[in-house]
Image: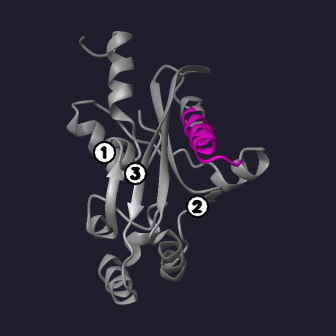
Amino acid sequence: MLASASEVRRGILEAAGIPLETMPAGIDERGIVNRSALRVGDDIATLLAREKAVAVAAKFPDRLVLGADQTLALENEVFSKPHDIAGARAQLRRLRGKTHALNAAIALVRGGSLLFEERATARLTVRNFSKAFLEAYLAAAGAAVTASVGAYQLEKLGIHLFEEIAGDHFTILGLPLLRLLDFLRREGFLAA
C-alpha cells in the first residue's frame, strides 16, 4: 500500500509492475517538521516518509506500507511546496542560476515495524532564465506549480527550467525506485 495521493509515485510503481492501493497518510507534515529538531533536507524527507508509512500501517497492520517524501534544499534552506503562483515565482527566482538538491526518501513499514528506509539525492542546476520566460512558464504550467516542492514537474514543462541534472530519474520524481526494488527482491517480496 502506498501512503500517498501522489499520482506520479503511483504511476512509477504501477509501471514497474508493483500491485498497490493508495491511501493518503493525512499527517500534519509542517507540524511534524516544526516539532522535530531537523533542519537538513534529507533528514526531513526521511522523517516524513516514515511518519506517513507508520500512520497508514496503523490502520492496516498486516499490509506492507510504503511512505515517501521529497524535500528541496538550496544551500542551508529547505523549501516547501509554494502556496500559490506568487510563491512559485519567488521560489523559482531564488533557484535561478543555482544548483539545488532534491532529497527523496522512502520507508517501508508493516504493523509497527520499520522494515526498510532509504534516501537518495539528485542535484539539479536551474538555468539563468529570463523574466519573460518565467512568466510564460508560470502561465503555461498554472496551478501545477503548487503541487511540487520545486514549483516544477520535471516530467512536464518544468524540464525547460534546467541546464544540468545529476541523479537518478526516479529520485528526482520522488521515489528511489531502484533501491526499493532491490530490497523487495532481497526479502522475497519480488522474484530475484
The three-letter code of the residue at mark 2 reads: Phe
Residue 41 place in picture, x, y as percent: 60, 48
> Quadrant of the image for the N terminus?
top left
Q: Is residue 168 visible?
A: yes
As drawn, the label of residue 79 is: 2
Q: Secondary structure at mark 1?
A: helix
The residue that appears at 65% across and 46% down in the rendered structure is 40
Q: Which residue is mark 3?
A: 6
The residue that appears at 76% across and 44% down in the rendered structure is 36
- Is the residue 39 above or below the residue 13 in the image? below
Q: CA distance from mark 3 to mark 2?
A: 18 Å
Q: How is the image coloured?
A: one colour
The residue that appears at 29% across and 81% down in the rendered structure is 140
**First reached walking from the N terminus: tag 2 or tag 1:** 2
For the residue pair 179 and 130, the one nearer the viewer reads as 130
Q: Is residue 25 magenta?
A: no
| Most common secondary structure along the magenta stretch | helix
> Quadrant of the image for the C terminus?
top left
Residue 148 place in picture, x, y as percent: 45, 61
The three-letter code of the residue at mark 1 reads: His
